Image (spheres, rainbow, N blue to C red):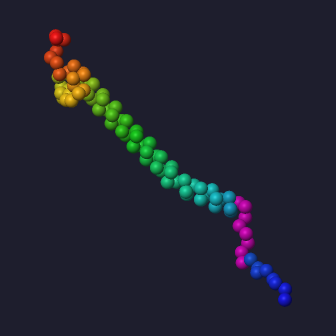
């Protein structure tokens, strides 16, 4: 008896179709990384914007309007002493 090979049931995929499938898979698998990077950039931008806005708001307030500082920073800043520069 001679062995016969089974006939293939379908044609092999063309080169263009394989390339399209590969590119699609790469895009699909890289989508979470791209979206994570976008969300990260937006969050960092919002945090920097909030910091800038609060810094500008505090600089626009006069010294009398600012809330008093507490803790070790107040001792270093000199704001806990009366105005006039006396010792």
Foreground residue among 72 and 13: 72
- Can residue 43 be seen? yes
Q: Which picture quadrant has residue 80?
A: top left
76 in relation to 10, above or below = above
86 in relation to 7, above or below = above
As drawn, the residue found furthest toward the bottom would be 1
Measuring 37% from the left and 36% from the top, which residue is drawn there?
48
What span is in magenta? 9-16
Judge left or right: residue 86 versus residue 11. left
The answer to if 6 sits in the magenta stretch is no
Judge left or right: residue 82 versus residue 72. left
Quadrant where the image shows the N terminus: bottom right
Which percent across, then down, holds residue 71?
21, 29
Q: Which picture quadrant has residue 41?
A: top left
Measuring 73% from the left and 72% from the top, which residue is drawn there?
11
Measuring 42% from the left and 43% from the top, which residue is drawn there?
42
Which percent across, then down, holds residue 32?
49, 54
Measuring 81% from the left and 83% from the top, which residue is drawn there?
4
Which percent across, then down, holds residue 83?
16, 15
5 in relation to 55, above or below = below
Which percent across, then down, holds residue 36?
46, 49
Judge left or right: residue 71 versus residue 29. left
- Can residue 62 be seen? no
Quadrant where the image shows the C terminus: top left
Judge left or right: residue 12 versus residue 44. right
Q: Which picture quadrant has residue 49?
A: top left
As drawn, the residue found furthest toward the right would be 2
Q: Mostly what secondary structure, the magenta segment? A: loop
The number of callouts visible is 0
């Amino acid at each position: 008896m001679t062995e016969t090979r089974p006939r293939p049931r379908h044609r092999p995929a063309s080169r263009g179709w394989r390339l399209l499938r590969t590119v699609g898979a790469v895009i699909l698998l890289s989508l979470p990384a791209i979206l994570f990077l976008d969300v990260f950039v937006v969050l960092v931008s919002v945090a920097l914007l909030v910091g800038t806005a609060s810094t500008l708001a505090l600089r626009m307030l006069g010294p009398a309007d600012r809330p008093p500082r507490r803790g070790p920073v107040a001792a270093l800043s000199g704001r806990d002493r009366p105005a006039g520069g006396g010792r």
